[in-house]
Amino acid sequence: MKITGKLTSIFLSVILVSGAALPAASAQSVADKPVLDIVSGVQTVVTYAGGSQITYSGALNAEKSEENAAASGIKSYDIRYNEKTLLTVTPYNPRDNSVGAEQTEQNGYYSIEISGVDGSKTAFITGLSASNIKEVEDAAIETALKGKAFDLTSVDFIDSELKAIKNSDEYMSWAGAFSNAMTYTGWARQAGFNTCDELTDNIASSFDNKLNVPDGALSWFFNGMNFPENELSSIIASSKSGTGSFLNDYAFDRIINESELCDSTAKAKNLISELKKGNAVILTILNDGDDINGSNLPPKFIQCMSCWGYVVDNRYPETNPMHYRSLFVTDPYSDVTGRKSRDSAPNRLSTVKLTEAYRYYQFFPFDDDLDEPDPVYGTSYAWSLNSENNLLYAYTSIIPYSPNLEKETNAKATRNKNRDVDLAAVSARVMDGTNDEGLNETEVLSSGSDFYMSVDILNASAAEYSGTYQIKTSIFDESGNRVYSRIKAFSGHFYPYTGNPSDSEAQKLSALPAGKYTAEITLNPAQRISEAYYYNNTVKTEFTVKDPAPEAGSLKLKAENLKPGKDGISCDLRLEGLTDETRASITEATLYELRTYTYHDGETETEIDEKECKYDGLIPSGCTLENPADSTLIMRLGFKDKPAIYVYSDKIDLSFPSVEIIYDYYDDEESEYSFQVDENASSLKKGDSIDFVIYNNSDAPYKNNISLKYYLEAENMLGETIRLTTPVKITLKYGESRKITVKDFAVPLPYGYYDVSVVLEGDFVWSDTDFHPVSIISGKEQNNNFCDVNFDGKTDIKDATLIQKHLAMLEDFNINQLFAADCNKDFIVDITDVTTVQMKLSAFSA
């Protein structure tokens, strides 16, 4: 990986995850100095835990100083050249999340954080060895002395590969990614595995060659558990009897955290947090037809990768998708070994580009050779990797091993999840009656209001339980005094590896006085139900109660200037009655939409969703609402020293006429349409046409005609748009559809690749059912050599490197370079184009 830019603007923070404990430092003498590499003009300024600083000549050698007693007590150190700071190295304990904290003997890996990349970006990578830190320092000094690009190469990452031999492990990317995670977190070593490849070999010999997900591997590793039989059993790997269960004092559900990524920026922020905390992260990708790293996988596939870091763009806030640019991953398919041993493969780090998109998917998670249950359908506002066909569906994080980590000590626990039920308390939720997502320690309840508590329960076993169970709820004040305790009986049916029974309802509690509290919820407190584990029956959460905020009655939420358009109705928002004093005290504002749908048979359905908005400072100023529905908007206002309040709008009628653009009347066998034209052409070639249907799909109240204008818009690879045709006016009766055929353009089409879309104008809501994207290629490639991105008259490894830098957001391409970089001509520049160049240059090219 190469990182370009002025190095003097780079801030590098190195997170030490291993090594001896660092005691608090007393004053250090020069005689106790750590190991240094003498370089002219370079100094190391060491700051010790006690606050004292010592300046040494030369650069501190991180690799040799790791075992040096003089390194004890170092809080941080700067490496400077000619009095300018090149980088800062800070050891800290990621489990404690505080600089200079006492170290834990963990897993021998480091993380680096580099700010100022390309002026605005921050890169973070974990899983590095001490020698890599030395390499970073050397690269930084080399850049300062000679002005070279900042180059971080030959990184020895944790990267277990598949052999990918038929009927061996070709469907087991989950095994490689899981082995990487367990090696990084130290669990593999605790179970007797020295390398990630050793663990992958064990998994491959213990499971049949089928798909799986990370929690399936984790439940086997700790508890020897196979997932229960269900409709996917024919395609999900199961283990041989007597394998796994290496560390069965731990319940796997206490080691793992899973999260879907469909909430876009919020979940991406959580993924970053998991990496920064020192947890291992495994990505689950729904591969709907495209390779991610040139691995030639079958379509309709579940793929797993190890995630080691990210690049973010600080020009955009964390709530903007443009903030999240790319991820660093290792891919078990990137260097398959065939008949050779796994450790013969290079340990290769890749960069995958993040793209956010609202998309529809129909997904069959298996190969044609396997039995097929029903496909999975859905829509997801999510992330794609390199290509829109690679949906980043979820991530799984695994906490590192620690000797202080809680485990089962109760002799009554059977430690057998295959035979005995295991009721695990996943999370406790404190609710104020409006927000059912629960409160965290930064949110507060009102001292004048009753509140609710509930617990999320998972039957983390392959056994089934039906009957009565008890829940004990206790609340403690800040001094540890019990202020509330109650045991309540429930009855329900827990199916294997499923969540709460339907009749497990929230418990209502009376208002508490102002103060800080801890809620503790325990399942099966008397242990009347025999379980595999008991230590995972208890969960705690903290919350705060404060005196009431200003009454919400003085505020009114107004939705104004409703305007129908693409995919919804836009509106402006205004808080009526908001004073400057109240505005100044608001710390956060969140908008929710409560929608009620009425169907033709008279049935109604209500749902509530958080809305993405435009903001005026902290307060939402506009949003887009859905059609057709009756909506009430709810704005939650948080205050620094008071409980949150909820401000409501009047009911909003969002029933508007609607129009749909349909592309999918083409033959189902074809999924994409591409047209070739001459540069600056004013029409498609003879016999070609772009066809679509415009359909008046309004609901019953709107049976009038709809007048509209339509035109075609073309967008090139730089994001520039051209109005390709002159707007045409048509009128559609209620329920009428009109087939449109376009052959001619209103303007000559310049050189480039273009995505073509239909745009409608009129007083209605319209949507684009785009199952068949349309593209136009205008002109021929302007360089004759295959994939010559730097236009030096030849194709070599420099071109592959240049594409990689572009994918890592480190190099901008002009339109000619984008055209040339699409080496496999799939209209997307991604890592598969790099692979195409490498294969062309290798001895294995066809």
Image (tube, rainbow, N blue to C red):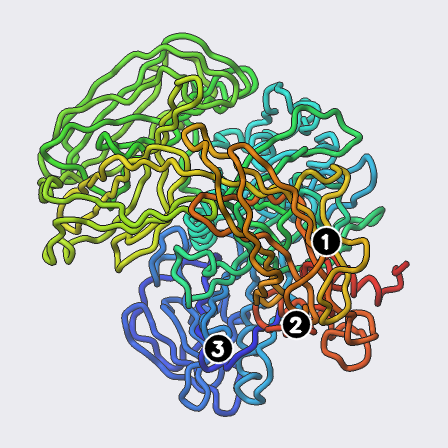
**Mark 2 surroundings: few (<14), some (14-19) or many (≥20) residues within 10 A:** some
Residue labelled with disc 1:
334
Which of 597 and 846 lies nearest the eye of the viewer? 597
Which of 646 and 82 lies nearest the eye of the viewer? 646
Spot occupied by residue 531 in the image (x, y as percentages of width and height): 45, 17
Q: Is residue 199 left or right of residue 450?
A: right
Mark sitting earlier along the chain (3/2): 3
- What amino acid is found at the position of numbered circle 1 in the picture? Ser
Residue labelled with disc 2:
815
Q: Residue at x 40, y 46 (%)?
A: 564
Q: Residue at x 29, y 37 (%)?
A: 652
**Mark 3 surroundings: few (<14), some (14-19) or many (≥20) residues within 10 A:** many
- What amino acid is found at the position of numbered circle 3 in the picture? Leu
Residue labelled with disc 3:
60
**Quarter holding the C terminus?**
bottom right
Q: Residue at x 46, y 80 (%)?
A: 86
Q: Please identify the quarter of the rendering in which residue 523 is found.
A: top left
- What amino acid is found at the position of numbered circle 2 in the picture? Ile
Q: CA distance from mark 3 to mark 2?
A: 45 Å
Q: Kindly tell me whether residue 589 is visible in this rendering.
A: yes
Q: Please identify the quarter of the rendering in which residue 316 is found.
A: bottom left
Q: Is residue 472 left or right of residue 567?
A: left
Which of 635 and 175 lies nearest the eye of the viewer? 635
Mark sitting earlier along the chain (3/1): 3
Mark sitting earlier along the chain (1/2): 1
Spot occupied by residue 389 in the image (x, y as percentages of width and height): 65, 47
Observer-side mark, 3 or 1, equals 1
